[in-house]
Image (tube, rainbow, N blue to C red):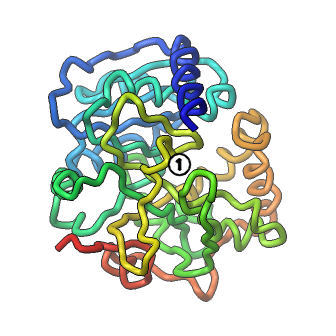
Amino acid sequence: MRLRRRHAKMRSLRKGLSLRPAADRTAQIKPGDVLLFSTLRNEHVRLPYFLDYYRNLGVDHFLIVDNDSTDGSGDYLIEQPDVSLWHTSASYKNARFGVDWLNGLQAKYGHDHWTLVVDPDEFFIYPFCDTRPIRALTDWLDGSNVRSFGAMLLDMYPKGRLDAVPYRRGQNPIEIASWFDPGNYLIQKNRKFGNLWIQGGPRGRVFFANSPKKAPALNKIPLVKWNRRYAYVSSTHMLLPRGLNLVYDEWGGETASGVLLHTKFLDTFTQKAEEEMERKQHYRASLEYKAYVENMADQPELWCKWSEKYINWRQLEILGLMSKGNWA
């Protein structure tokens, strides 16, 4: 595992050579700042709400890699005073789906900071997030000597056709994609890395019903008190050293955890899926996107009679999808 971690660090240095700074404001970063890292491509329509959401949560600085956007995403981000932006036209797939790029940036700028790694369609929910900023969470984690915080990816979707309601720039996507699967999840432990592996939800139910083990992973560890020795090895699903993956209690108790509200399924989804299937820059030659395109052609709808409408984090805790643990 030490050799694997060393290899991941070397990859991040090598792949990072393709990054070109477009707006470097990292001199603004102060000790103790909460930093957000993200990789994106053609997400201009989502960016205004995404940035405002995390600003309101208490993120101090955004470090973003733009993978050759053509929709104005880069120009918009350059104008944001709390964003540092890098551009690359290199292969997303060859950078281990962006992991190498962000590992390098986190090592350089994230050391000894709480770092949050999310996509532009993911919105971090944690206990008391409606009344406490993210710094309250990180202060509590620091006081508890905890360095990583897990969050289940919860796929959100509208009731009815995905293309029925157009998403407006700057709009809260949960206003449209406000439903989720309250159950229907498979959980097992990854013996090699020690993390939990979660699958299911609407993607397992609709797109991978005949092959549930091929469904996308829903387990993530997006919030980490970063150290330059750390490395993500598969998206934010797992890290090295392995101890960072133990974000759950094996002995019957409850460890505090969160949720990432995943708002992929808006009216923009079909076009995005078709583009990514053609680019073949995602995992397993974009097999996931191939399943999306094939299944959504006839019936672009994910809602079912078991779907539940999202209210707040307390609802998710009652359903067992997250926990406040012993944080009061």
Quarter of the figure that contains the C terminus: bottom left
Task: Evaluate whether residue 228 shows in this view.
Answer: yes
Name the image quarter holding residue 8.
Answer: top right
Q: Depth check: 78 or 15 in front?
A: 15
Three-letter amino acid code at disc 1?
Met
Residue 251 pos. (x, y %) = 43, 77
For the point 64% across and 66% down, the residue is 199
- Mark 1 neighbour class, 10 Å CA radius: few under 14, some 14 to 19, many 20 or more: many
* Residue lying farthest to the front in this orientation: 2
Left or right: where does residue 150 sit relative to residue 185?
left
For the point 47% across and 30% down, the residue is 102
Q: Is residue 244 above or below residue 159?
A: above
Q: Is residue 285 above or below residue 161?
A: above
Residue 298 pos. (x, y %) = 81, 66
Name the image quarter holding residue 259.
Answer: bottom left
Residue 300 pos. (x, y %) = 71, 66
Q: Depth check: 37 or 80 in front?
A: 37
Left or right: where does residue 226 sit relative to residue 181?
left
Name the image quarter holding residue 27.
Answer: top left
**Residue, disc 1:** 238
Task: Evaluate whether residue 72 shows in this view.
Answer: no
For the point 47% across and 65% down, the residue is 176
Quarter of the figure that contains the N terminus: top right
The number of discs equals 1
For the point 52% across and 80% down, the residue is 182
Q: Is residue 58 above or below residue 19?
A: below
Name the element at disc 1.
strand
